[in-house]
């Protein structure tokens, strides 16, 4: 095995590494993903102070939550995945982590909307390095019958990270909210919300070094596939367009709901019930950490059990089950009459919102030939994040600002978003079962 992890002639037949090696790698990747989502999500707890100091609307905040982060995060995913197919994946992740952590800290220097927008773009550029390389590494560390569980655990970093961001971030925001300007060495006086970005961003730079302790696994790719151009994936996409489009679009529409809610649920609770950011963050963070983190793992286990029972559409079937549970909880959570009841339904929402996505990642690894996995993952993330991250927060905000009368209608805008996108995504996944079965039954070229 070389540092780049390129396949040897025996790579495709090599035994998988000991389970301890695989689970150590997943643990480090899980922490990296958790840190990524903390840096990505912390903005949701500081909507009020940022709007006050920068003088911006909900729609502008939706752009900061979504398009600013998602644009280059999505566009760079494919070329970075190309690098991940040929070079050391652990180094790609470590460098990306240092970049996104630094850019999160730089958000704390922003004094205008466009400065904050540019820093959020930088966070997205760094985070683009993580998941395509991580998916590819994990697929080379675990046999197919354990892949859904491993990817489910890795993907739970979204929900653990968001939960920690809401709990710890809410606590930090609450602790510094009553302070005046905070003096930061070499920077000067900054507002409390700016200091929060420094606090959550800088530790990730140090953790990037830990990523270098993860062994680079042997690639299970024949040597003939080395050096393929990026366009090599095009025939595969054309031959399997129905299954791939159904997978990408179905899961992406469910992601629109999740990302819209993550961006606006803290603000909805503050506006509708008059609670503090710390109270809102604690309630949502606990639900995200426990129910969101467990939901994606349970979804992966359910997919593995379907697969063990001989269902070749196991991963899409698990995704559709999560979508069915998402429909009523997405509609109800932001419309509940009290803070406690709303927080309880949000917890159920987070369980079902997370349920499909370990199976979604596992499906990609099963669908694609080994040498195209990282690139297919990157294209999936491009679609998933342009729709989910890019549009989810913006759709909710724009609906509230322009169709429903303004800030006090944010909860209704969230419920309508759930009522539209959750059923549509679930229906598309169910309609794709047959095409997906046909694809995975095909003897894919290596």
Image (tube, rainbow, N blue to C red):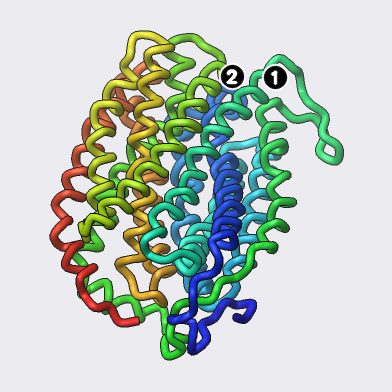
Q: Residue at x 35, y 29 (%)?
A: 349
- Give the quadrant of the C terminus: bottom left
Crowd around label 1: few <14 · some 14–19 · many ≥20 (10 Å): few
Of 225 and 301, which appears nearest the observer?
A: 301
- Residue closest to the far right: 185
The picture places residue 408, in percent across and down from the top left corner, at 38, 16
Tag of residue 400 = none
The residue identified by callout 1 is 175
Crowd around label 2: few <14 · some 14–19 · many ≥20 (10 Å): many
State the image quarter where residue 98 is shown: bottom right
The answer to the question of whether label 2 and label 1 lie on touching residues, with beta carbons closer than 8 A, is yes
State the image quarter where residue 427 is shown: top left
Vertical placement of 331 versus 235: above or below? above
The picture places residue 186, in percent across and down from the top left corner, at 85, 41
Q: Residue at x 33, y 21 (%)?
A: 333
Tag of residue 278 = 2
Q: Secondary structure at mark 1?
A: helix
């Amino acid at each position: 095995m070389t540092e780049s992890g390129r396949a040897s002639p025996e790579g495709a037949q090599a035994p998988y590494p000991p389970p301890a090696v695989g689970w150590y790698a997943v643990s480090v990747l899980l922490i990296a993903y958790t840190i990524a989502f903390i840096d990505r999500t912390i903005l949701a707890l500081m909507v009020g102070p940022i709007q006050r100091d920068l003088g911006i609307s909900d729609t502008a905040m939706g752009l900061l939550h979504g398009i600013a982060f998602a644009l280059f995060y999505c566009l760079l995913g494919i070329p970075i995945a190309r690098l991940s197919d040929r070079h050391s994946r652990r180094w790609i992740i470590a460098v990306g982590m240092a970049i996104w952590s630094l850019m999160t800290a730089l958000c704390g220097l922003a004094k205008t909307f466009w400065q904050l927008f540019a820093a959020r773009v930088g966070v997205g550029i760094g985070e683009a390095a993580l998941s395509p390389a991580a998916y590819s590494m994990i697929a080379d560390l675990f046999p197919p019958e354990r892949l859904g569980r491993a990817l489910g655990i890795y993907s739970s970093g979204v929900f653990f990270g968001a939960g920690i961001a809401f709990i710890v971030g809410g606590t930090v925001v609450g602790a510094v909210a009553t302070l005046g300007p905070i003096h930061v060495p070499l920077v000067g006086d900054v507002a409390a919300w700016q200091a929060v970005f420094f606090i959550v961003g800088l530790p990730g730079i140090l953790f990037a070094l830990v990523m270098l302790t993860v062994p680079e696994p042997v690639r299970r790719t024949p040597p003939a596939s080395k050096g393929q151009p990026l366009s090599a994936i095009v025939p595969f996409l054309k031959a399997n367009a129905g299954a791939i489009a159904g997978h990408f679009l179905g899961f992406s529409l469910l992601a629109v709901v999740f990302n819209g809610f993550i961006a606006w649920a803290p603000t909805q609770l503050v506006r509708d019930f008059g609670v503090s950011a710390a109270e809102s963050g604690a309630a949502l963070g606990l639900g995200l950490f426990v129910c969101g983190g467990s939901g994606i793992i349970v979804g992966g286990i359910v997919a593995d059990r379907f697969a063990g029972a001989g269902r070749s559409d196991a991963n899409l079937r698990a995704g559709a089950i999560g979508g069915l549970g998402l429909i009523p909880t997405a509609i109800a959570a932001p419309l509940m009459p009290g803070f406690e009841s709303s927080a309880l339904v949000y917890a159920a929402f987070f369980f079902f919102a997370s349920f499909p996505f370990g199976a979604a990642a596992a499906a990609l690894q099963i669908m694609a030939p080994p040498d195209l996995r990282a690139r297919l993952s990157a294209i999936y993330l491009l679609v998933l994040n342009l729709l989910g991250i890019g549009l989810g927060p913006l759709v909710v905000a724009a609906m509230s600002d322009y169709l429903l009368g303004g800030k006090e209608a944010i909860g209704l805008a969230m419920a309508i978003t759930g009522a539209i996108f959750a059923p549509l995504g679930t229906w598309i996944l169910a309609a794709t079962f047959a095409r997906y079965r046909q694809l995975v039954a095909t003897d894919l070229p290596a």
